[in-house]
Image: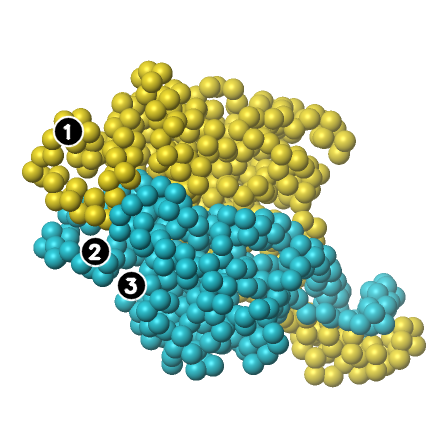
Chain colours: A yellow, B cyan
Amino acid sequence: MARRRTAPAPTSTSLEQLLAANEVVVTCGSGGVGKTTSAAALGAMAAAHLGGRVLVLTVDPARRLANALGLEQFGNVESEVPRSAFTDVGVEPRGRLFAAMLDTKASWDDLVNLHAPDEATREAILANPLYQNITGKFVQSHDYIAMERLYEIHSSGRYDLIVVDTPPTRNAIDFLEAPDRMADFFSSRLLRWLTAPARSRVLNYASKPFYTVADRILGSQFLEDISEFFLLFQSMYDGFVERSRAVSRLLEDHGTTFVVVSTLEPAPAQEAEFFVNALAERDLNLGALVFNKVLPTDLFSPKAAKVAERLCRDATPVAEAVSEQVADTEQVCRVLGEVAESFLNYRVVASRESEEAARLGATAEVVATVPYLAEDIHDLAGLLTIGDHLW
Amino acid sequence: MSTGPVDLLDRKLVFVTGKGGVGKSTIASALALVAARQGKRTLACEFDAKGNLADFFSAAPTGWDPSEVQPNLFAMSMDTEESLKEYLRLQVKIPLVARIGPLARTLDFVANAAPGVKEILTVGKVVWETKEQHYDLVVVDASATGHVVAQLSAPQAIGELVKVGLVRDQTAWLSEILDDSATTGAVIVAAPEEMPVNESLELAERIRTETRVDLAATVVNRVLPELFSRDEEEVFEALRRPDAIAALETAAGGPLAPILDAAELAVTLRRTRTVHLDRLREGLPGVPMLYVPELFTRSHGIRATSQLADALAAELGY
C-alpha cells in the first residue's frame, strides 16, 4: 500500500552541496561586504573540489574581481585562471576556473548584431547618438546587459557552474527586474506612440500634445533622434522580448540560486534583509547567507569580560604579578588598561553583530561564516582560505 | 583648518559619495548636522530614495517634501517623478495641470529610456535648490561609486545630445553651478581597507576626468585608535608569552588570553588599515583628508550621528 511519494526537493545543508546542485549562483549584497571576494572564493572552491568548468562572472562596473583573482585585466572574454595558480598553493584542482567581466558597450553591440533584421538597421542603430550614449555612459543599461550576458553564457553550455557577482543591493534589485523592464519597454504603447510619427509622418490626435510639449522641452532634433532610436529598436522587438523573458526564466529556474553576502554591521545587514525579502517576493531561491568579517567568539567569554572590567578599573594588582618579568608596574598597568578597554569595545561590537546574525540567519537554510581576516584577499591562496570557511 | 581653496562647508552644494558600505550616508548626515549646528540652514538630500536617511536623525521617513529633522536641518528623498513635475511647473510654465498626469508618465518613460534624463532630473533638483538659495548648504547623500559620475556629468551628456530646446537651455545654469568650485564640491567617503581605497582612487580619477565638479575632500571613516606606543608594544608582546599569561591569569583569577588576542586583532587591523590609508593619501595629493574614528558604541540614530558630527567638526576646525 505504501505508494512511493515524490521525494521532497533535497535541501542543501552546506555551500558545497548548494554549488554542486546548481548551475547558476548569484551572489548579492551591499557594497563593501566582500561579495565579489565571496563569489570568487566560491568559484575557486567549486573548480578545486567539485570539478567541471566554473566561470566567475562579475557584472559590477568596478573592477574588483580582477584584484581578487590576481588577474591584471580581463574584458568581455572569459579567461582561464591557470592551473599552476592552484598547484602553486598545493591544490590539485578537479576542474577549471574561468573569470570574465562585463563590458557593457561590447555586449550591447553584440546584441544589436544578433537582433538587427538587416545590415542597414544595424549600422543605423550603432551610429545613433542615443544608442551610443545609452551603451557607453549610463548605468541602467548595465543591469539588463548583465542578465542578458549571463543568459548568453549559460545557454552556450560552456560551463557547469556560473557564479555571478552583482552590483550592490539596490542596483541588484534593478538587475533582477531588468529583463521584465526591457520587455515592458518594447511592448509599451508609448513606444508605438513615439515611433508613430516617424512611420506615418502624420501626428495623430492622441500624440499631438505630447509632441508639442516635448518639442518645446527637448528640441526637435533630439526628438528625432529618440524617434529614430525607438523605431530602429522596434525592429528588434521580437528578439528582445523573447530574450528578456528567457532571461527571467533562467533567474527563476531550479538550477539558479542566490547567495546573499553581508557583514554584520547595521547598514549592510539591513540591506541584506531587504534583499532576502525581495527574493522571497519574487519566488527566487535563497540558497545561502554568508556572513563576512565576523569577530572571534572569544569576545563573548563572560569570564574574560569580568577580568577586562576589573583591569579597566585598576590593573595594578595584576600588573604587579608580572612586573619583574616584563616591565615596571606602571607601564604594564597602562598596557593592560588599553588591552582591556579594547576588548570591551570589540565585545560591544561583537554582541551587536551576533544579535544581527541570529536574526538574519533564521531566513536561510545554509548560513556560512567567515571570520575577520587581517589580510585583504588578493590571490588564489587567500580565496581558498575564505573558501575553506564557506565550505 | 583650511580645507583647500574653499572650506568645505562654505560651499553651497556638497555631493557625498563613496563605495557602498563605507558609511557614506552616515558621513553625509553628520556633515549636514555640523553645518546646521554652525547656524547654516541646511538641506540633506538622499539620492537613492530608500527613505532611511531619516534613520540617522531618528526621524520619521523622509519624502520629497523636506522635513525639519533637527534645528536648521531639513531632509528629503529624491523622487524623479516629483522632480519632473516640479520642473514642468517651474520651467516649462505650461498650463497643463490637468494633463500633467499622462504627460508626466510619457516623459517618465522617455526619462527611463533616454540617457541622462533621469540623472539630470536628480541632479537638477539639488542644483535648483542651490540656485534659488533656499538653503545655505545642500548636502547630498549621492549615489555610490559607479552612478554618481553619470549624474554629475549629466549636463554635459545632455548638452552633447540635445542641441536646442528648453532642456538644452537648462543645462547651462546647471553646469555653471556644478562647475564652480567655490559653490560645489564632491566628498569621497573611504574606509581604510584595500578594495575601498582602490575604488576611492578610481572614483577620484573619474570625477576629475569625466565631470567638472571639484573634489573638495576625502573623509576617511572608521579610523581605528592606536592602542600602544612603540615601547608599550614591546611590553604587550612580552605579556603574550606563555609564562606571562600564566602569571597574569593567576593574579586576575580569570582568562586573559582572549583579551590579549583581541588586542592583537585590534593592533593588526589598525596596522593593515594604516597601509591603505597611506596609499589613499599618496594617491590624492592636495585633497584635504578628514579622519573620523571608529565608534565602538551600541548607539545609532541621532546619537551616533551626533558623535560623528563632533569628530568631523573637530577635523574641520570648528
Tag 2, which secondary structure? helix
| Nearest-to-viewer mark from 3 and 2 | 2
Residue in front for this viewpoint, B194 or B210:
B210
From the top left corner, tell me how far across and down residue B306 is, in percent: 49, 76
From the top left corner, tell me how far across and down residue B151 is, in percent: 42, 51
**Callout 1: chain:** A
B131 left or right of B227 in image: left
Q: Residue furthest left?
A: A205
Q: Which of marks 3 and 2 is nearer the N terminus?
A: 3
| Callout 1 and callout 3 share a chain | no
- Whether the residues at callouts 1 and 3 have beta carbons within 8 Å, the answer is no
| Callout 2 and callout 1 share a chain | no
Q: Distance between the residues labelled 2 and 1?
A: 26 Å
- Whether the residues at callouts 2 and 1 have beta carbons within 8 Å, the answer is no
| Nearest-to-viewer mark from 1 and 3 | 1
From the top left corner, tell me how far across and down residue B33 is, in percent: 46, 75
Residue in front for this viewpoint, B172 or B144:
B172
Q: Determine which residue is flagged by label 1.
A: A201
Q: Determine which residue is flagged by label 2.
A: B92
Q: How crowded is mark 2: few (under 14 residues within 10 Å), some or many (20 or more)?
A: some
Q: Can residue A186 be seen in this view?
A: yes
Amino acid type for the residue under numbered disc 2: Val
Q: Determine which residue is flagged by label 3.
A: B64
**Callout 3: chain:** B
Could you say which disc has been placed on residue B57 in the image? none
Report the residue at 28% width, 67% height from top: B65
From the top left corner, tell me how far across and down residue B123 is, in percent: 37, 56
